[in-house]
Amino acid sequence: MALAPVGTISFTVPPERAPAAGTFGATASVAVPPEGELQISLSDEAWIDVVQDGKAVKSAAFSGIKTCPGIRKSVRFKLAAGPATIQLSGAKKPDLKVSVLTPE
């Protein structure tokens, strides 16, 4: 996913963790399945917020390993079925590999 300087992004709600100057971010719309749970994995460090119905949703679970090649962190969110917005912020590089899956 290509990211942009955080100062140029219109986040739906302010990121829970304020991004440092000079970092990157992005937003993406997703459709939450009827099961209502998503796992978002990133290749590098960045903050993940998920917004649904105009409100930030707290994460349900988190895992992160700095030494795992390809996946830096995974965060799970319990959501209602329907549209949601993923907000990424605070990335130090202008691109990230992002995976959005329903957890097994």
Image (cartoon, rainbow, N blue to C red):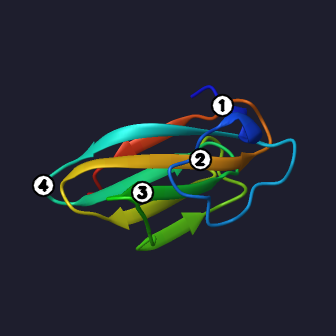
Tell me the residue that label 4 is attached to.
34
Asked if marks 1 and 4 touch (Cβ < 8 Å), the reply is: no
Figure quadrant of residue 19: bottom right
Q: Is 18 located above or below residue 31 in the figure?
A: below
Q: Nearer the viewer, residue 52 or 60?
A: 52
Residue at figure coordinates x 57%, y 28% from the top left: 1
Disc 1 packing (10 Å; few <14; some 14–19; many ≥20): some
Of labels 3 and 4, the one closer to you: 3
Q: Which mark is residue 36?
A: none
Q: Amino acid at mark 4?
A: Pro
Left-right relation of 28 to 44 = left
Mark 3 vs mark 2, foreground winner is 3
In primary-sequence order, the first of circles 3 and 4 is: 4
Q: In this image, 88 relative to 75: left or right?
A: right
Q: CA distance from mark 3 to mark 4?
A: 17 Å
Q: Amino acid at mark 1?
A: Leu
Q: Residues within 10 Å of mark 4 (few under 14, many from 20)?
A: few
For the residues labelled 3 and 1, the Cα–Cα distance comes to 18 Å
- The percent position of residue 75, horizontal first and vertical second, equals 48, 61
Specify the label residue 88 is tagged with. 2
- Which residue occupies 28% across, 63% down? 79
For badge 2, the amino acid type reads Leu
Query: Mark 3 highlights which residue?
Result: 51
Residue at disc 3, secondary structure: strand
Q: Secondary structure at mark 4?
A: loop
Mark 1 highlights which residue? Answer: 3
The answer for how far apart the CA atoms under marks 3 and 2 are is 11 Å
Q: Earlier in the sequence, mark 1 or mark 4?
A: 1
Q: Residue at x 40, y 74 (%)?
A: 60
Q: Judge left or right: residue 73 versus residue 80.
A: right
